[in-house]
Structures are given as structure tokens and as C-alpha cells.
Image (tube, rainbow, N blue to C red):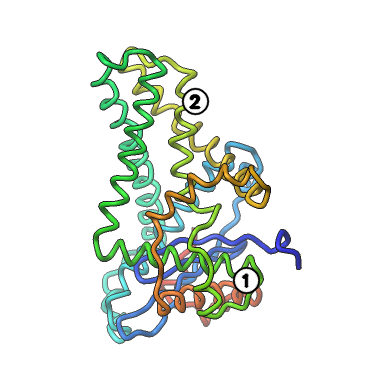
Amino acid sequence: MKKSQVPAYGGQAVVEGVMFGGKSQTVTAIRRKDQSIDYFYLPRKSYPVLQKLKKVPFLRGIIAIIEASANGSQHLNFSSERFNVDPLEDDKISEEKPSKATMVLSVAALGVLSFLFGKFIFTLVPVFLASLLSPVFSSPVSQILIEGLFKLLLLIGYIFFVSLTPIVKRVFQYHGAEHKVINAYENQLELTVENVQAQTRLHYRCGSSFILFTVVVGVFIYLLVPVNPLWLRLVDRILLIPVVLGVSFEVLQVTNKLRNVPVLRFLGYPGLWLQLLTTKEPDNDQVEVAIASFNELLRVEKEGLPSAEMPESSSISI
């Protein structure tokens, strides 16, 4: 099979584990307190309306982001609940558990709202900071460039400081393990710890690259709207969030397609540079968990997941 024909898979790091997603299933593997590996399965549900929207350029990126936030929150919830709990005490986690419907709605809504809240903060704070410098940088173009600079510094500073905390550093290591597994798979290598560790921890399709593209794309889009008065600028930024997200997603797709084209491949380099902060080199145990997650995804994608094999917590789907 040619490299270009290898199916594309995505994933995300969670607490002490990695989630991978395919066409019909998503699977998380985590390292438990007793060093065993535990799994969480979340089937993808297909909604005709969403499937149609996913085919529409610029709209498909927004749908993908909402789905990823909702699904990712459930995987993250599973990992954070169980990674530091002895498997023999899992019954305590399930005590007084709300109904599945309630849990699905609350966790999914929390994921989407958390994403939107973060996006609002990183969009509006730079506007206020740039406006404080308007006596010095008064022209519309200079204000937008300063705003973009503040947004970039805020983003890099936030990532750098949170990466200093032990738990986030380990999540970033699992993020690196996720990329290494995907790179090994796309290079059609056997998924052994040795082969995976030899791969780069950077990847063109990473969400980190997408976040950086929202900063760059935003600068160009904001040039099309007025910067004064301040209240109008703030309203414009909020209304343009879907536009910036949609265009940035398309840019990410283009850079991924061009990653093997000489010269043009450099378009994706800024996103890769940001990944030097959002990923860390994983150890062998973390790579082992990432490989287990990916292999389990391939298995359930091929064989399906019998209900008898699905644990209580893994039957949640949206």
C-alpha cells in the first residue's frame, strides 16, 4: 500500500493515556495504578445532517471541532477518574452515577463550553491589550498586528507555564507518543516500541498547528473589518470566531496535503514549531500505552465491539 493510501487516524492525549479515533470507533488506553492497561470505548454515532455539513468547506472544520471537543471530554473524563484508582476499587467510581443520558449531555456540553470559553479569552484579551497601545500604534494595520502578537505571546506563554506542571508534562509526553504511533503507522512500520520511538513527535495534522493557524488567519481576516470603536472591534471578534476556525481548518488541511511537496511543505513549519512546546519525548512505558490504544482501535474497527465485551462506562455514545 502506498503511503498516500494509508487511512488517516487522529487522536489526543489524556491523563496517563492516549485516545485514537477511526471511522466508527474511538478508543482510549490508560495506564492504571497497578500498571495494567485499561480501555474505554466510545462508538461514533452518525447523524445525517452532520455528515452533510462535514462535506461543506469551512463549515466542516467547525463541526469537526465541536465533535472532537464533545467526544474528547468523555475520554478525558474516563482517564482522569480512573488513572490513579486501583482496578479493584472501580465500583466506588460508579456509586451514585447519574443516568447515561445525563452524563452524555453534561460531559459533552462541558467540553464544548470549555473550548468556547478558552477561545473567547484568547480572542478578546489581546484586543484590550492592543487598544492600550493605540496612542503609539494608532493605524488599523498596526493595531491588528499588535493584537496578533499579543495573542501569539499569550498562547505560547500559557502553554509554556502549564507544561511546567508535572501532570501536564506527562500529558504532553503522551501527546508525543500519540504522534509517534501515527507517524510509524503512516510510514507502514511494525508498531513496536523501538520503531515508534524512532519517529518524530511532530505531525502536520496536530491540533496545536490548528491553534497557531487561528492566530495567523485571524490577522488577515481582521484586516477586512474596522478596529474602531473598541466595542465594534470586540463584537466583530466574537462574530468572526466561526469564520476564523473554519478558514484555519482548511489551511491545516492544505498544509497536510502539501507536506511532501518541496518548498510548499514549509507552510506547515510554524505549526510544527509550536508542537515543540505541546509535545514531549515519551518514555517506553508511555509508548507502550499508545501502541496498545491504536492496536485496540484497529481491532474494534475491524471486528466490532460486542456488547458483552463493553464495560458499563464504555457504552456511552453521543
Residue sitting nearer the eye, 28 or 308: 28
Question: Which x, y percent locates residue 61?
Answer: 55, 43
Residue drawn 47% across the image and 66% down it: 19
How would you rate the neighbour count of disc 2 (Cα within 10 Å): few for under 14, some for 14-19, many for 20 or more?
some
- Mark 1 or 2: the one toward you: 2
Q: Name the mark on residue 301.
A: 1
Say if 18 sits above or below 230 in the image.
Answer: below
Residue 303 x/y as whole percent: 64, 77
Q: Earlier in the sequence, mark 1 or mark 2?
A: 2
Residue 97's disc is none
Q: Is mark 1 on a helix, strand or loop?
A: helix
Determine whether, in the image, residue 164 is placed left or right of residue 183.
Answer: left
Amino acid on which disc 1 is placed: Glu
35 relative to 217 in the view: left or right: left
Q: Which of 108 and 178 is in front in this view?
A: 178
The residue depicted at 40 percent of the width and 47 percent of the height is 112
Q: Residue 221 carries which label?
A: 2
Mark 2 lies on a secondary structure that is helix
Amino acid type, label 2: Ile
Could you tell me which residue is drawn at 37 percent across and 60 percent down? 103
* Total marks placed: 2
Q: How far apart are marks 1 and 2 (CA)?
A: 40 Å
Q: Position of residue 165 (x, y in %)?
A: 24, 61
